[in-house]
Image: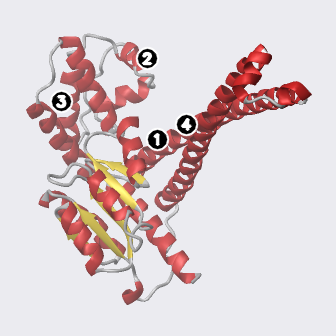
Amino acid sequence: MGELRPLGDDLTDTSRALAQALRELFEGLDVSVRRYAARRQRDPGTFSRYMNGTRLPPWGVITDLFTDLAEHRGAAVTTDAIEFVRGLYRAASDAGASPRNAVEILEQQLADADLVSRRSSVRGDVLGDALLERTHRIADLEVRLSQLEADRIVERRRADELAAAHPDISGLLQERDALQLDVQRLSAELREAQALRTAAEDRCTLLERQLDAVEKPVPPLPAAPQDMPKILIVDDQPSNLLAMTAVLGSLDQELVTVSSGREALKALLDHEDFAVIIMDVQMPEMDGYETCAHIKRRPRNRDVPIIFLTAMGVDSEHSARGYAAGAVDYISKPFDPWALRAKVAVFTSIYLERHAQQ
């Protein structure tokens, strides 16, 4: 696993072109496969297959290469270079997309959601223990204060006179007030941790259903064509709208495509019965985050799930901002067709299930 192996003779043209570009990036790091895999906490065999073109890497692997190469050289990688590799990646993805690649993408998202859930659970336990400890301390202070206030002489004095008559009173009152402020802060943080865990658990449930949709496709709930919900696709790039329309056309649902956040808000007024919204994050004038926030403020549309489509990679900062705005899911560009169809199919099934119960 020290050096890259030669490219195989059975690679497709698109896989070979991408593999050659990635190998050039990797060779610029002057490091062995095993050492780099250890640095990025990846399996060296899997990383080697990425570099040999026998497996399509997640886009995050490629962005890591760009980041590490920029750090090694002390200069940022040019936008043209990134777009060139992105084009090769899109071509290889379109030519070699398979359920297996979608499963890897969804499994990674499931692992990320599970990690958030576990960390939030641990943090909730720690905060709960701290909250309980402060509550007990406040109770003890209240008992001590009650005992002091039971004194007839102290009882007849104002608070400032109490402090003068009993020097301990002032310190006890300050300690109690500080603990009460601590309890308020800890309570808020505990609620936040519990909300994060609940949201992460919901994402895990969704992702498990999406994996089932890829691995064990099942027919959707029966519905007349006129009863099928719509899909709203929001992207300022016509090529992306065309690609998503082609991928989702097999789902037999009406696709409504718009090219801006403002057009999306208008479409939601003009149409009903959207099962899901797929929205590009990076759009001029009104980006995906702002558009999502506007949608969630409307009672009529606030429950429509939103999938963010992003070319920036799904790091913790962007995902946290997206979830805070109201998105329920993410998929990276260039998107995997199987993964996108699975996500939309699951949200459509959820929509039909809810309406069947009404």
In this view, the mark in front (4 or 1): 4
Q: Earlier in the sequence, mark 3 or mark 4?
A: 3
Relative to 250, is 73 on the left or the right? left
319 to the left or right of 199: left
Which residue matches tag 3? Answer: 21
Nearest-to-viewer mark from 3 and 1: 1
Q: Which tag, 3 or 2, sits closer to the chain's start?
A: 3
Residue count near mark 3 (Cα–Cα under 10 Å), binned few <14, some 14–19, many ≥20:
some
Q: Which residue is mark 1?
A: 108
Residue 302, horizontal then vertical, whole percent: 41, 66
Q: Position of residue 84 (x, y in %)?
A: 12, 37
Residue to which mark 4 is pinned: 115
Q: What separation in Å lies between label 3 and label 1 (alpha carbons)? A: 24 Å
Residue 49 against residue 244 in the figure, above or below? above
Secondary structure, mark 3, is: helix
Location of mark 2 (residue): 38
Please say if the residues under marks 4 and 2 sit with CB atoms less than 8 Å apart.
Answer: no
Q: Amino acid at mark 1?
A: Gln
Residue type beneath disc 4: Leu
- Amino acid on which disc 2 is placed: Ala
In this rendering, which labeled residue sits more in front, label 3 or label 2? 2
Inter-mark Cα distance, 2 to 1: 18 Å
- Name the residue: 22% across, 52% down: 287
The quadrant the N terminus occupies is top left
Instruction: Tell me the quadrant of the picture where the C terminus can be found.
Output: bottom right
Q: Earlier in the sequence, mark 3 or mark 1?
A: 3
The reply to whether the C-beta atoms of the residues labelled 3 and 4 are less than 8 Å apart is no
- Residue 138 vs 298, above or below: the answer is above
